[in-house]
Image (cartoon, grey):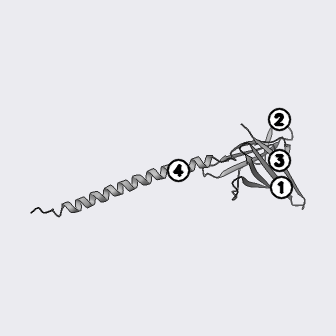
Amino acid sequence: MTQVSPARSPLRRTTALFTATALTLLFTVVLTLTSARHASALCVASGFSGTWRSSDDRLSRIDVWSGEDCRLYARAWSTCPNDTTRDCSWSSRPKVLQATPDRNFRFFSYNWSNASEVLQLTLKDSAHMSVWDHVDYTSGRKDSFTVAMVKDR
């Protein structure tokens, strides 16, 4: 009659446990790397990303890009008052584009000393965007206008 040594049974269990742990760890690393690549690809794939231009001096350009945190950032520009061949940024700091349930609609805002301004961006297609700009002045006056923008290629 052959007997199994009691020393071999714990060794097999330890080996099996070690193998299962190693495979689980490997699977977790592969899944994490795949998910990170997929998330990164989704982050960059926004239709809003790019430089958008218009012929309106009040809002001549909007730059939109994805940050490292995968949020969209924007910066608005107007035609410079002293040099109409250039655009002047509204601020040195980018603004976060706020998400909405509608994937083709985003907004961001500026707070000035005499007004609050909200820009609402609506994608029409991959090359066209409509921007509604609404200004609430501290005096009570309100001003709104819409600008058609084209993606810079």
The x and y percentages for residue 17 are: 31, 59
Three-letter code, disc 3: Val
3D distance between C-alphas at marks 2 and 3: 19 Å
Q: Which one is earlier in the sequence, the residue at label 4 or at label 2? A: 4
Q: Measuring 23% from the left and 59% from the top, which residue is drawn there?
A: 11
Three-letter code, disc 2: Thr
> Residue tagged by mark 2?
85
> Residue tagged by mark 4?
36
Q: Secondary structure at mark 2?
A: loop
Select label 3 or label 1 by which is in front: 3
> Residue tagged by mark 3?
147
3D distance between C-alphas at marks 1 and 2: 25 Å
Callout 3: 10 Å neighbours few (<14), some, many (20+)? some
Q: Which one is earlier in the sequence, the residue at label 4 or at label 3? A: 4
Q: Measuring 29% from the left and 58% from the top, which residue is drawn there?
A: 16
Callout 4: 10 Å neighbours few (<14), some, many (20+)? few
- Classify the position of the C terminus by image quarter: top right
Seen in the picture, residue 95 relative to 82 is either above or below; the reply is below
Q: Which one is earlier in the sequence, the residue at label 4 or at label 1? A: 4
Callout 1: 10 Å neighbours few (<14), some, many (20+)? some
Q: Which mark is residue 134?
A: 1
> Looking at the image, can residue 12 be seen?
yes
> Looking at the image, can residue 92 be seen?
no
